[in-house]
Amino acid sequence: MFGIQEDYENKLATAGEIASRVQSNDVIYLNAGSGFPITFSDALTRRASELRNVRIAHAVRPDPTMLEIDYLCPEYADSFTLICEYSFDRVAREAVTSGRGSYRPHYPSQSGMSWPYEIDYLVTSASPMDEHGYFSFGAAACYPPDFLPQTRRLVLEVNPHQPRVYGDSFVHISQVDALYEVDEPIPSIDVTSGAKPTEVEEAIGAHVAELIEDRSTLQLGIGAVPDVVARLLRDKKDLGIHTEMLSDPLVMLVECGAVTNRFKTFHPGRIVCTCCFGSEKLYRYIADNPAVETYPISYTNNPENIARNYKQVSINATLQVDFMGQCASESLGTRHYSGIGGQWEFTRGAYLSPGGKGFICVRSTAKNGTISTITPTLSPGAAVSITRNDVHYVVTEYGAALLKGRTIEERTKSLISIAHPDFRDELTFEAKRLCYLT
Ligand code: COA
């Protein structure tokens, strides 16, 4: 079409040239996971000595060892600070706990709408432009569409390895301010290098899988327990997928025939997600595949949309659960550990879904068996990620406690029954002292 290619050529630069336009005090938003623009990040960090107080925001980053140079390292503290939308990697977590950044509490479906600053540069990976002038945000639709209204300049890292994915995740060249080209594999996860699940993870996964019925629609995160659950669901029938992040274990369920999406009541016949993060094989699966649709995170994670699925199941993890069923997944007491991710939104959506089930998984102990993760009260300062009103099932290696709709007395009894046996007497004593049990 007339003008599209010229527009592209006019906006084309190198990552270094675009990074050289950034000024002190600018706000930069980097897309997450498989959409993270590694080359721009490296180019910007190389300018550290010329810049002061550049605020960089992002959610999940790829493994920081994929970066040549990391803006979050302590030596760049005067140049870059982090607006932490979610912390997953050790470096980002350390930046927040040591004051080189600050966590911004919000639900991901509200991340764009709750964002209070003007963004000087929003940078994301994208697939190559098509003949109509559109780029796909590929495996990482998640954040850019929701942040465009507050963005002054949209920058694309155009990469032929970024798959073109269906759904609502396209941007037109006329909306782009600058772009640069790379030809590198997009950030991935080596799914073969993960440690074998422990006995505890196997047991938790088995308790969850047992409660999942045929024709359920699944949300699974990354980690050993979701891997175990997926493996144990291979003989189920007509499962569907509506999840925040599409991962390899879910695709395995498609390949073995357990997922058909046939009985989904919201986007039937389609996998719905906001991003995909995993192996090269996963990225090949989603490329130009009409069965996979990515949408902005404001859409996939909206609990009302999630609840439009019949039998929506959510499976997430936490760090500590108190007798009322409040779950602390983001902090250990006052110490920041993670972000909420889609955990509340999917738990809430599953709670509202007809026949839905929300599972919160936790190992019964931490620190080599010296601490019970089920406790009378949360540690002082802990952030409540799932409120007692939204919790449905809590699962440890000792079983699944059904809390939805139950009294505090019933919750306390059920939670003590799935606590580690070494702590049950002590927990019962405390429950009586608090008058939760008579
Ligand atoms: N008290 C003290 N320490 C505790 C603890 C407790 N109750 N529970 C866990 N810990 C410690 C562990 O010992 C471990 O320490 P180590 O790193 O020194 O070994 C550390 O905290 C992490 O615990 P672990 O159980 O291994 O957590 P994890 O890595 O499996 O992550 C969450 C669990 C909750 C942090 C993670 O699932 C998360 O970020 N969830 C929120 C976001 C989300 O759900 N996203 C998906 C939705 S789409």
Image (tube, grey):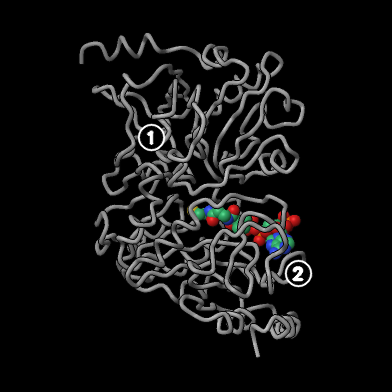
* Whether residue 87 can be seen here: yes
Is 345 placed above or below 182 here? below
Q: Mark 2 CB in 8 Å range of ligand 1? A: yes
- Looking at the rendered structure, the secondary structure element under dot 1 is helix
Question: Which residue is rendered at x = 69% and y = 78% of the image?
Answer: 420
Tell which residue pokes out farthest to the front in this image: 435
Amino acid type, callout 1: Pro
Question: Which residue is rendered at x = 61% and y = 67% of the image?
Answer: 362
Q: Which mark is residue 426?
A: none
Q: Which mark is residue 371?
A: 2
Instruction: Classify residue 199 by image quadrant.
Output: bottom right
Q: Quadrant of ligand 1?
A: bottom right
Question: Which residue is rendered at x = 48% and y = 22% of the image?
Answer: 182
Specify which label sits upstream in the sequence, 1 or 2: 1
* Of 70 and 186, the residue lying toward us: 70
Q: Position of residue 408 (x, y in %)?
A: 57, 80
The quarter in which the N terminus is drawn is top left
The quarter in which the C terminus is drawn is bottom right
Amino acid type, callout 2: Ile
Q: Give the class, few, some or many, for how many residues have Cα within 10 Å of label 2's Cα (few <14, many ≥20).
A: few
Residue corresponding to mark 1: 145
Is 355 placed above or below 142 here? below
Q: Is residue 413 left or right of residue 130?
A: right
Q: Is residue 61 left or right of residue 53?
A: left
